[in-house]
Image (cartoon, grey):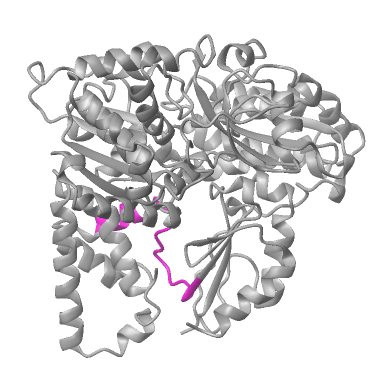
Amino acid sequence: MATERLIVMAGTDERDLTKLAEYEAIGGYGALQKARAMTPEAVIDEVIASELRGRGGAFFPTGRKWSFVPKPDQNPNPHYLVVNADESEPGSFKDNEIMARVPHRFIEGCLIAAHAVESKEVFVYIRGEYTGPYEILVGALKELEDRPDLRGDATIVLHRGAGAYICGEETALLESLEGKRGQPRTKPPFPAVEGLYASPTVVNNVETMATLPPIIAMGGAEYAKLGVPDSRGTRLVSISGHVERPGNYEIENGISMHELIYGLGGGIPGGRELKAVIPGGSSTVILKGDEIDVGYDFNSLLKLNTAMGSAGVVALDDRCCMVQLGIRISEFYEHESCGKCTPCREGTRWMTQILRRLESGDALQPELDLLLDVCDRINGKCLCPLGETAAVAVASYVEKFRAEFIAHVDEGGCPFGDASPLHDVLAPVAIHLATAVPA
Amino acid sequence: MTDPHLTSEAKSQTSPAESAKHFSRFYEEVQELKAQYPDRRSAALPALRLAQEKHGYLSPEALRECAEALGTTPAFCEAVASFYDMLHLEPIGRHMVEVCTNVSCALVGAQQVLETFEEELGIRAGETTEDGEVTLRPIECLGGCGWATVVSVDHHYRTHVKPADVPAIVQELRSGD
């Protein structure tokens, strides 16, 4: 039976850690004091030893990312730490819970990272819709106002987004933080060299920050004993969709996906069969229900050509139509495409249109190939991964459930119809906000 | 979050003197926002949010005030605002109801929740009630997939919403605050 392993969420089962006093009672901010007694290089070495990889989805080794930042004597510009709290990936809701339940551990992590990369200014870019976590962070920062011993000489600014999935992409986030439309930049230069205000900038995810205090407290080598090779430590996994007990679960990397869904998640409601699993947020290649005897870690999922991504696991039962899933996912990316690169802006729209024709029974056999062709024409042709992930995800539905797609053509319509919970779901892209407020 | 007493309608009833006072307070607040950042332009999003809260939506007047306080042009403010889903260049209701219809919420009945709101409010998704009270719209993933269906009511999340919960939410909005 799978169990949780609380490292990031440690203490939440017994205390209200949104309160500074409660957090300090379990040793909170002790890791920060320890880190400040070390040189920045020593902190970076400790994080390298922990083998921590970024929890936002790209899985880049955190210590290495920090080591790319030029030292102050190499680049006199101020160094910035920007925390990506723009969690918007369908299926992921872990950062929401981290900020809401362990705000001080998160802030402590930000201050440790600021020390390591020699930054005096920290910006937390939190998605605009997250009013709850924002208010909790405001409260936590207020508690720190009277504690210069903890705050040190770094300032933390909470910067609220205004509704744009693309701002989770780091360069789009930086554009948005500079007060512009959130459209990705070309890379290089990478943010470590030219990021916010063209200065050296580290962009890290919320969970990555909240993992730093335990790493510093226990030591990098100790943390690296958790998990499996290339996926050390724990991960907050968001489980949703057709499971009995949806929610966030902190697990040691490498436990089997079967245990995630049937152990922690409690299995599929109504005694139904598991048809498919989105393993790491909507951007990842889908797994069939019989492919889940696999470790939930980077290498194991890579063998199945998919990824942990942002650790959003979505279970779909046997009523679900994969063409309908494709429509809803494609509509999401169509809505969120920033419009800068033509293959993404136009391609996601075409994908939705072809999928709609398949669903309604109007599509002819060659249109299935056309769909894959459109996907192929997005891949690798855009500045950022948004369009590509849409294409890769939808192409994986076709690849793994080809017979179902063909049945839509052969039967002249959807074999599932309104028995599928994804039938006729109204997506934001399908409507334009009616503007009429009567005069 | 939106100050219900400062809708565009209410604002038009204020005197020029009051209007000037409102603007000067807004101007000061934006200066404080600018001071948080090494580059004043970073205050654009928070300033637009503030302007929207004051005016109900980003009217041409709101954009002009925002531009003046930021030290930029109304065109720049509009260009930025038009990119973001939470910033509205057209009037919206005093209350905003946003039903997440992304995959995880849809799997457990978000569409039925949205349709129940349509029935209770007597409008289609994407519309505002005739009295200008409530705007209803579907929204992309709100980041609460494990607590589906998530409905954001005036930017505060309601979780585990079922169609049966909808009449009470609408009643709450109708009875005013």
| Dominant secondary structure (helix, strand or loop) of the stretch shown in magenta | loop
Which x, y percent locates residue A310?
Answer: 53, 31
Question: Does residue B57 appear in the picture of this structure?
Answer: yes
Which x, y percent locates residue A86?
Answer: 42, 42
- Please say whether residue A231 is one of the residues in the magenta stretch: no
| Looking at the image, residue A16 lies above or below residue B15 | above
| Quarter holding residue A348 | top right
Residue at 48% across, 30% down: A7
| Quarter holding residue A42 | top left
Q: Which of B12 and A62 is in front in this view?
A: A62
What's drawn in magenta, residue-wise? B75-95
* Quarter of the N terminus of chain B within the rendering: bottom left
Residue at the right extreme of this rendering: A411
Q: Nearer the viewer, residue A228 or A426?
A: A228
Going by the image, does A137 lie left or right of A364? left
Q: Which of A383 and A257 is in front in this view?
A: A257
| Looking at the image, residue B158 lies above or below residue A369 | below
Question: Does residue B85 appear in the picture of this structure?
Answer: no
| Looking at the image, residue A214 lies above or below residue A270 | above
Residue at 15% across, 59% down: B32
- Please say whether residue B86 is one of the residues in the magenta stretch: yes
Going by the image, does A53 lie left or right of A13? left
| Quarter holding residue B172 | bottom right
| Looking at the image, residue A346 lies above or below residue B143 | above
Going by the image, does A402 lie left or right of A379? right
Residue at 31% across, 15% down: A46
Which x, y percent locates residue A84?
Answer: 37, 37
Which x, y percent locates residue B24?
Answer: 14, 74
